[in-house]
Image (tube, rainbow, N blue to C red):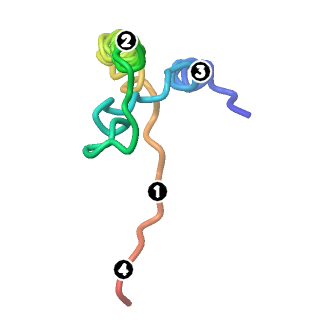
């Protein structure tokens, strides 16, 4: 449980972010084994554009989140030696 309200606010913002949308071209096969209707392609692109708009809004808030993150105290991390 997070006791710091600033950390809780930032974590809540990140939890509410939608999943990054996949590029619709990845869903459409290069050599289709079936024909996708124009309506299916339109729906796929429309959904992708909506998700990209949501991500655009989230990215617009990045400056605010960065300023809020800068207010957090540094977290000490133990030093690790790799390869020994």
Q: Quadrant of residue 44?
A: top left
Kindly report the distance in space between the C-alpha atoms of the residues bearing marks 3 and 1: 23 Å
Kindly report the distance in space between the C-alpha atoms of the residues bearing marks 3 and 4: 34 Å
Kindly report the distance in space between the C-alpha atoms of the residues bearing marks 3 and 2: 27 Å
Could you say whether the residue bearing mark 3 is in a helix, strand or loop?
helix
Q: In the rendered view, does 6 fall on the left or right side of 62?
A: right
Which residue: 40% across, 38% down? 34
Which residue: 56% across, 19% down? 16
User: x%, y% of residue 64?
Assistant: 35, 12
Kindly report the distance in space between the C-alpha atoms of the residues bearing marks 4 and 1: 15 Å
Could you say whether the residue bearing mark 4 is in a helix, strand or loop?
loop
Q: Say which residue label 4 marks.
A: 82
> Contact, CB < 8 Å: mark 3 with mark 2?
no
75 vs 57, nearest the viewer? 57
Could you say whether the residue bearing mark 2 is in a helix, strand or loop?
helix
In primary-sequence order, the first of circles 3 and 2 is 3
Q: Say which residue label 3 marks.
A: 12
Q: In the rendered view, does 72 fall on the left or right side of 16?
A: left
In primary-sequence order, the first of circles 3 and 1 is 3
Q: Residues within 10 Å of mark 4 (few under 14, many from 20)?
A: few
Which residue: 47% across, 51% down? 76
Which residue: 36% across, 80% down? 82
Q: Say which residue label 1 marks.
A: 77
User: x%, y% of residue 28?
Assistant: 33, 36
Relative vertical location of residue 59 with respect to residue 23 in this rendering, above or below: above
Kindly report the distance in space between the C-alpha atoms of the residues bearing marks 2 and 1: 44 Å
Q: Which mark is nearer the camera, 3 or 2?
A: 2
């Amino acid at each position: 449980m997070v006791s710091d309200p600033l950390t809780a606010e930032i974590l809540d913002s990140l939890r509410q972010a939608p999943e990054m949308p996949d590029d619709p071209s990845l869903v459409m096969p290069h050599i289709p084994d079936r024909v996708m209707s124009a309506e299916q392609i339109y729906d796929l692109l429309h959904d992708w554009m909506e998700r990209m708009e949501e991500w655009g809004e989230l990215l617009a808030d990045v400056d605010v989140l960065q300023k809020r993150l800068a207010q957090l105290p540094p977290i000490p991390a133990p030093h690790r030696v790799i390869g020994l």
